Amino acid sequence: MPVVTLTTDWIQDDYYSGALKGKLITASPAVNIIDISSNIPSFNSARAAFVLKNSFTHFPAGSIHLICVNAEPGVEESILAIEYEGHFFIGNDNGIFGLIFRNQPSAVVELPFPEKPSGFSSLEVFVKAASRLANGEDISGLGKQRDGFNKSIPRRATIEEDVINGSVIYIDSYQNAITNITRELYERIGKGRQFEVALQSNHYKLKKINQTYNETSVGELLVLFNYLDLLEVAINKGNAAQLLGLDMNSVIRIRFFNK
């Protein structure tokens, strides 16, 4: 049974979702539609990319992922179908694919656009391409081959002497603040040295990285490397981002000390 996932900036009960699902099932009755995330903040491609990047690998090979966030193409943009690591992605070529993919895709196809667009591209162009893929058509037959796509560059942590300068890139359901500081970067720069993690312009400082949340007492601040191997700021059984005033792009620093 073909799997089609939806990542959207529509509220859950908006008619957009119902219309798209109805049209898709009409075109491909056997398709299995799964919502990865609805109600992404409007036009927030960065958040949509983070969610999809860290979700799609858990779906079966051949899954078709519709990115219905900031989906209407601008004057210089197109709608693309892309094959990447055994999965298919359909979305607006507005830079979001560069935030999702680490490597070069197997195929990039520009999808034909209706002569009289309705302003609901995901209903027209997305569904037509997804249903054709779900029905077994090769991606190369969907449109014009492209060599590449527009690429937004993910915000990365920087290094300044003995300091890693990172930032918050995602706030999850528990108000944990996830940063762009990777475990690999921390270990490569730190080399086992003593350190401190500074938050909110040094207002909060921590000298330990937890393995689990429960190593710290309930209500206490902590940092750990999460499931994604990204440094996360949390409060055990609390809401770190809300209580500390952390938001997207808040700065997090790790300073290492030479003995």
Image (cartoon, grey):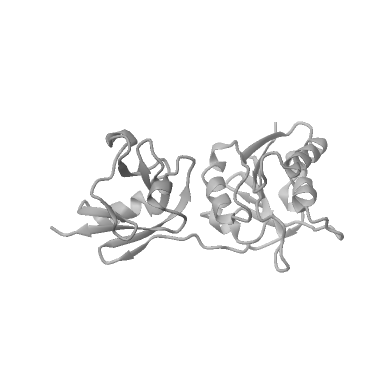
Locate the C terminus and report the quarter of the image it occupies.
bottom left
Observer-nearest residue: 99 or 219? Answer: 219
| Residue 74 higher or lower than 20, as above or below | below
The picture quadrant where one finds residue 65 is top right
Observer-nearest residue: 129 or 72? Answer: 72
Where residue 160 appears, x then y in whole percent? Answer: 30, 67
The picture quadrant where one finds residue 24 is top right
Where residue 105 appears, x then y in whole percent? Answer: 59, 54
Observer-nearest residue: 183 or 197? Answer: 197
Name the side, left or right, on which 198 lies relative to 78: left
The picture quadrant where one finds residue 15 is top right
Name the side, left or right, on which 187 lies relative to 242: left
Locate the N terminus and report the quarter of the image it occupies.
top right
Where residue 88 appears, x then y in whole percent? Answer: 65, 46
> At 37% from the left edge and 43% from the top edge, which residue is drawn?
234
Where residue 18 appears, x then y in whole percent? Answer: 76, 39
Total residue callouts = 0
> At 73% from the left edge and 46% from the top edge, which residue is drawn?
138
| Residue farthest left in this picture | 259
> At 82% from the left edge and 39% from the top edge, which residue is drawn?
27
Observer-nearest residue: 24 or 178? Answer: 178
| Residue farthest right in this picture | 116
